[in-house]
Image (cartoon, helix red, strand yellow):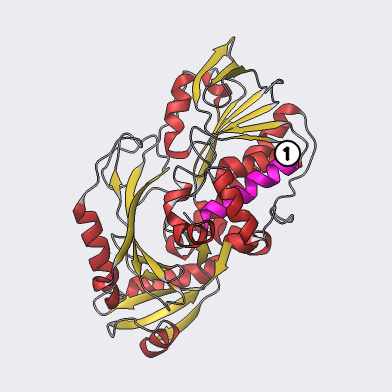
Amino acid sequence: MSDDPTALVIGGGATGAGIARDLALRGVDATLVDRGGLGSGTSGRSHGLLHSGARYAEADAEGARECIEENRTLREIAGGCVRETGGLFVRLAGDDPDYFEEKLAACEGIGIPTERLDGDAAREAAPGLTDEVEEAFRVPDGVVYPSRLVAANAADAERHGASVRPHAPVEDVTVRDGEVASVRVGGDVDETLSPEVVVNATGAWADSIAEMAGVEVGMAPSRGVMVSVEYDGLGPALNRCRDPDDGDIVVPHDGEVVLGTTSVPVSDPDDYETADWEVERSVEECAAMLPAVADAPTVRTWWGVRPLYEPDEAGQDRRGISRGFTLLDHERDGAAGLYSVVGGKLTTYRQMAETTVDRVCDRLGVDAACETAAEPLAHADEPDRLDELVVEYGGANPTDADVVGARTGD
């Protein structure tokens, strides 16, 4: 690299790649860096659910509304990065019927489309469901392939002039006279850059970058396990209609289903223990909805770390933390030009990027509207090319290894 970018985006997950794409579409010279391959953090270690927002409807209306809006947008722009499956929220015998009614009413109030089903209709919609299903309702959940989504955003960013540099860890951030002065980037970049704006889009690792700049963020990450087992023929994604708990989501993939998940606080997203009970409990609880998964062969197991933001979080249960997102302007902390975008969901990455780039453009004096909700992603309808790009960006990850890996031979 010979010239300093106007904007440096740190973190090559969906949000960082989305920010780089949005900046480039607005004519801002941007560079995206990540310490590993793209999507190697939280984005590539999820269960791959494209949220309708129903999961959060009664407890976090704002986060749910963001999800349904972005769900619709991604179906329009993301092509082979997503798959429309629909979803079911199922109530088993013994689950609280009042909670079912509360969630259904909350979805309808937000504008999340629903269709109520009795137990027989639910089993017809998803063969293999337990006889214990009393009732269910449909929602427009789906599946997202994060490796492809990140690659498509990165390729679109490059197509519009951005530079994308995986395997380029940030080693230091220098703040001088109340402003970010430079960022030392190692690895394949191995340079000290002096951008006008720096965006910290590192998710659960946001505290680490902030600390280099002498500011605080306040992440409250939690780990969760995903277990992919052999199972063919599940149509919709399944959600247990009860208060969020371990093992209440089943996501259909190609010839597999992903079972999840747990929520255990971690202090270091790079160094945390994992436990067999998380796998066993997730399988057991998901089997209460779909009994055959209890004995299905396991294909792979992985953990991901949620980028939860709650600076005042002191308790042990982090399920109640909002899945909405927050943009922090560190000018208030004496580091003008540095922004951290935290929280949120994979489903809402594009909206997170738009909000962030709006603020960055205000600072830079760039008068350009966001176009990312209307412009299709690069190669969105070319899954083979997307999978080649996943390999080029070093972005193959466990969430969608059954799809991307099958095409690339990994």
Residue under the point 51% across and 40% down: 37
Residue 122 % position (x, y): 41, 84
Please identify the quarter of the rendering in which residue 163 is found. Answer: top right
Residue under the point 43% across and 42% down: 307
Instruction: List the single residue furthest toward the top.
Output: 177
Task: Please indicate, yes or no, whether residue 52 appears anywhere in the rendered image.
Answer: no
Task: Please indicate, yes or no, whether residue 43 appears anywhere in the rendered image.
Answer: yes
Which is nearer the eye, 306 or 39? 39
Residue under the point 46% across and 77% down: 235
- Residue 158 falls within the magenta-colored stretch: yes
Residue marked by disc 1: 24
Residue 254 % position (x, y): 46, 69
Instruction: List the single residue furthest toward the bottom.
Output: 120
Residue 401 % position (x, y): 45, 57
Kind of residue sitting beneath label 1: Ala
Q: Which residues are magenta?
A: 145-160
Element on which disc 1 rests: helix
